[in-house]
């Protein structure tokens, strides 16, 4: 597949959001995406960007993305978290995912960081196989824990803090 891997800019964010929504539908959460194009521009561009997004660009069409940001590990120090690696359905299996993944690994390595981490759904066997084949350690004994805004509000109310 002939595509250029590069960092996203503000003009790419509408297409980035389309891919995020495509992933949400694939992960059976089509209505879960709340982020907007304006959010992606505000937090993903400029000197104070909160994330870096790499895109696979073919003649202005974004065929895939890899979105990463810094985390801090009490064991390793600053690390990179790969939030999403997405390739449009019709372009999967053509090397774009590997090209984006390789760019993220290169980026993390060039920053001198000691760990790259991400989460993969246990039922997404093709993704698990892809990561394991690259030498990544898929840690099935860990569980991802999240608390949404409603749960946080309920907890704080229960504690008398709201």
Image (spheres, grey):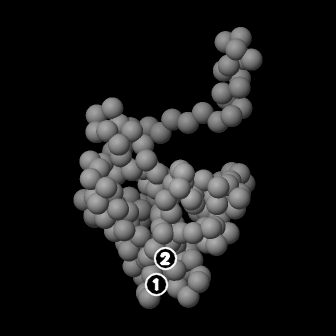
Q: Residue at x 48, y 69 (%)?
A: 7
The kind of secondary structure element at disc 1 is loop
User: Considering the numbered disc 2 on the image, is that residue within a helix, a strand or a loop?
Assistant: strand
Residue at the location (39% across, 79% down)?
95
Work out whether residue 12 or residue 17 is closer to the camera in this orientation and state it: 12
Residue beneath the point at 67% across and 12% down? 159
The answer to whether residue 89 of the structure is visible from this angle is no
Q: Quadrant of the C terminus?
A: top right
Q: Quadrant of residue 15?
A: bottom right
Image x and y of residue 139, in percent:
33, 45
Left or right relative to 124: residue 110: left
Q: Quick one: label 1 or label 2, which is nearer the N terminus?
A: 1
Which image quarter holds the N terminus? Answer: bottom left
Residue 56 disc label: 2
Image location (x, y in percent) of residue 77: 31, 39
> How far, Cα to Cα, is label 1 from label 2?
6 Å
Q: Residue furthest front?
A: 47
Judged left or right of residue 162, residue 21 is left
List the residue tagged with mark 1. 3
- Is 133 placed left or right of 41 in the picture? left
Q: Are marks 1 and 2 in contact (CB under 8 Å)?
A: yes
The answer to whether one can see residue 50 in this image is yes
Q: Residues within 10 Å of mark 2 (few under 14, many from 20)?
A: many
Seen at 44% across and 37% down, the residue is 143
Say above or below: 157 vs 104.
Answer: above
Query: Is 30 drawn above or below residue 102 in the view shown?
Result: above
At which x and y percent is residue 20? Answer: 61, 62
Q: Is residue 73 above or below residue 15?
A: above
Q: Is residue 97 above or below residue 82?
A: below
Q: Residues within 10 Å of mark 1 (few under 14, many from 20)?
A: some
């Amino acid at each position: 597949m002939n595509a250029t891997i590069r960092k996203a800019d503000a003009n790419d964010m509408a297409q980035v959001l389309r891919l995020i929504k495509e992933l949400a539908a694939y992960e059976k959460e089509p209505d879960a995406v709340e982020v907007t194009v304006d959010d992606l521009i505000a937090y993903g561009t400029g000197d104070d960007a909160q994330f870096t997004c790499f895109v696979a660009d073919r003649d202005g069409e974004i065929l895939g993305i890899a979105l990463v940001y810094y985390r801090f590990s009490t064991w390793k120090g600053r690390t990179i978290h790969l939030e999403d690696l997405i390739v449009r359905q019709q372009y999967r299996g053509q090397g774009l995912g590997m090209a984006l993944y390789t760019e993220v690994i290169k980026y993390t390595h060039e920053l001198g960081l000691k760990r790259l981490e991400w989460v993969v759904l246990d039922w997404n066997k093709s993704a698990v196989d892809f990561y394991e084949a690259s030498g990544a350690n898929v840690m099935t004994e860990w569980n991802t824990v999240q608390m949404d805004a409603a749960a946080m509000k309920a907890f704080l109310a229960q504690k008398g803090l709201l």
